[in-house]
Amino acid sequence: MLTIEIKKRRTPKSRSKILRRLETFVRAQFSAFVCGMCDYVIMILLTEFTKIHYTIAIAIACTLGAIMNFSVNKVWTFYSKNSSYKFSLTQQLWRFLFVVISSIGLKMLGTYLLTDYAHIDYKISRLITDIIVSIFYNYMLQRYWVFKDCTK
């Protein structure tokens, strides 16, 4: 018996959907990087020059970075001309506030554990923690919960 294997081709529509998702992911990571570098520098300045403990400096710096990040994400990263957001600005702010507070807690905890128990410098510990939290926590919640569009 002769069998013919037919490979399923991706349609241009599904390919463009994948590209849009990839573009959104790249934008989110770029936004997180820029805002993260600002709050990273603030953390170092607070720790080194004002002698605030690095965990407290993280909380202060991340709060300032989060304000920048919300603005950038709302108007650039997750914005779509073809769709509006599912949630109002007030709902987005409350959801974002939850994400930010929990994210700051994760960053403080991760940095503390790596610094005090793995004996890694707090600057390096913060970078490691930021990368993990940014990709696996912040992006997912912001994309699919805070800035969700009406079509999803």
Image (cartoon, helix red, strand yellow):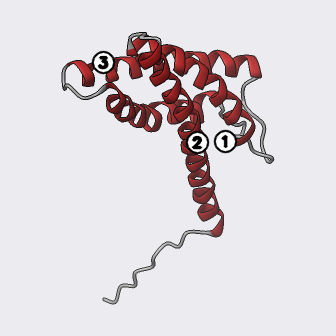
Mark with earlier residue (2, 3):
2
Q: Quadrant of residue 4?
A: bottom left
Q: Are marks 3 and 1 in contact (CB under 8 Å)?
A: no
Q: Quadrant of residue 93?
A: top right
Q: Which residue is mark 2?
A: 28
The image quadrant where one finds the N terminus is bottom left
What residue lies at 39% left-to-right and 16% top-to-bottom? 54
What residue lies at 34% left-to-right and 89% top-to-bottom? 2
The image quadrant where one finds the C terminus is top right
> Residue 68's spot in the image, x, y percent?
66, 28
> Residue 96's spot in the image, x, y percent?
61, 21
Residue type of the residue flagged with mark 1: Thr
Residue type of the residue flagged with mark 2: Ala
Question: Which dot, 2 or 3, sits closer to the camera?
Answer: 3
What secondary structure is found at the residue carrying circle 2? helix
What secondary structure is found at the residue carrying circle 3? helix
- Left-right relation of 19 to 8: right
Q: Are marks 1 and 2 in contact (CB under 8 Å)?
A: yes
How many other residues sit within 10 Å of disc 2, few (<14), some (14-19) or many (≥20)? many
Q: Which residue is mark 1?
A: 77
- Above or below residue 149? Residue 114 is above
Q: Disc 2 versus disc 3: distance between alpha carbons?
A: 26 Å
- Above or below residue 83? Residue 17 is below
Total numbered circles: 3
Q: Which residue is mark 3?
A: 112
> Residue 42's spot in the image, x, y percent?
53, 23
